[in-house]
Image: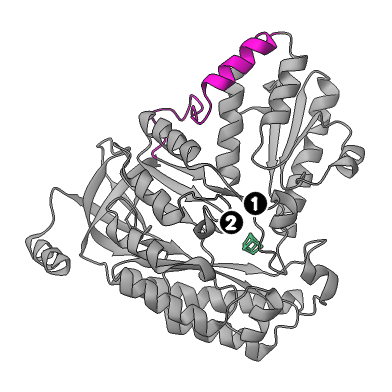
Amino acid sequence: MNVADSQRVASALERLGYLGTRRADEADVIVLNTCVVRQSAEDKAVGRLSSLRPLKLKNPNLVINLMGCLVGVRGYEPLQKRFPYVDVFSPPSDPGPLVAHLTQNDSRLLEESETQQRFALMDGELVLPEKERGRLVATYVPAVLGCSHACAFCIIPYRRGVERSRPVGDILAEAQSLVEQGVKEITLLGQIVDRYGRDIPDGPNLAGLLRSVNDIEGLERIRFLTSHPNWMTDELLTAVAELPKVMPHIEVPVQAGSDKVLADMKRGYTAGDYRKLVAKIRDYLPAGSIATDIIVGFPGESSSEFQATSDLLAELKLDVAHLARYSPRPGTVSERRLDDDVTDGEKWHRFRLLEELQENIAGEINSQLMGQTVEVLFEERVRERWRGRTPTNKLVFVETNQDLRGVTKYVQITWTGPWSMQGALRDQLLSDQLISLAASQD
Ligand code: SF4
């Protein structure tokens, strides 16, 4: 979500006439877009912000904009006192305060009325920053902002505010404009993206939105994340299975495998519910992939409760598990009411156990692709290799001198590891695979 928000700010600044630079010491405006989902992310943001102070002392005309979850949606007076050298504070997803500050204070800019006109003309569209125009292959489009679920550990509802679905027309206009600028793959974003539209009377739900986005000419792939298990409906899975551009990859966090821990986390489902959901997803998408999130060391998580998470992961054999160690976030239910009683050392121990388990699972799943031919949409060249992803979101690298940016090619897999694969370009599918594809379509 922050990547999408930063793209929005860069686009707004370019419309005002600013250009991007990689050097902070030559910038007129510095935007620090922050994440506070874990304490380590917040510490990093604060450290970076402190490092900007000498630049402001050297150049008082420098505009520093602090944006994102560190600012939040509930007022920023304490931050103003703590960081007096920050000129503008912006809540997540909102370039408005920065644009307003610059149009009022930078005499080099267009007249305010002219600027407003320029912004109004662009409503619903997103003009990519110049460095990305015609080069960016895959990008994000926010569909749901904020979250109203309030999991016990999570700070996001406090910082990003209540759930708000964007109007379908805005999403489609933005997606269309991105495709016109060369984008081939769009990921629709939401903290609980599968709740899309529930706050819009008579509006489409996520299945309906996917159907509309699927109709955009020139767009090749659509993804969505992150889903909550309770909102993953049959209608949605039917849409994913039917729509050719929607990729068969589902990101649906479980967070823990113990019912007691899940209840303490206030997630709203049991491990049994999650098992059933995974079975259902696999029924709808037999060739699909599933990613999950897990937090280890939640307050009160005993060894046997951790073991339940480990057992669930071993049993379900999911393609990806994003792992995190619990860290109490000020103001959340778990921070206020529960004792952070699993030691740091034990959290690390549990984290590494799951990391090793998942490495083996992912390695085994990916090894089944050895020698197979897969479709890869290539995004960028990293050193000597082109990097792309399969429909199931697996990373594939190919060594070639061809320019593959934005091109979908068949690749025969020649090496597999848990986190990525390598392959060689193939002009077409091998004949036995054409036969097996035909059989699976029957
Ligand atoms: S669903 Fe839970 S974890 Fe996800 S953003 Fe909302 S409160 Fe946070």
Determine whether the residue tagged by mark 1 lies in a helix, strand or loop.
Answer: loop
Q: Are marks 2 and 1 in contact (CB under 8 Å)?
A: yes
Q: Tell me the amino acid under the disc marked 2.
A: Gln
Q: Position of residue 122 (x, y in %)?
A: 52, 23
Q: Which residues are magenta?
A: 108-137
Q: Nearer the viewer, residue 267 or 292?
A: 267
Mark 2 vs ligand 1: CB under 8 Å? Answer: yes
Residue sitting at x 49%, y 50%: 202
| Residue ID for mark 1 | 146
Q: Position of residue 366 (x, y in %)?
A: 33, 68
* Quarter of the rendered image showing ligand 1: bottom right
Residue sitting at x 32%, y 37%: 405
Residue 431 appears left or right of 308: left
Which of the 4 image quadrants contains residue 59? top right
Q: Tell me the amino acid under the disc marked 1.
A: Gly
In the rendered image, the residue lying farthest to the right is 81
Q: Nearer the viewer, residue 196 or 94?
A: 196
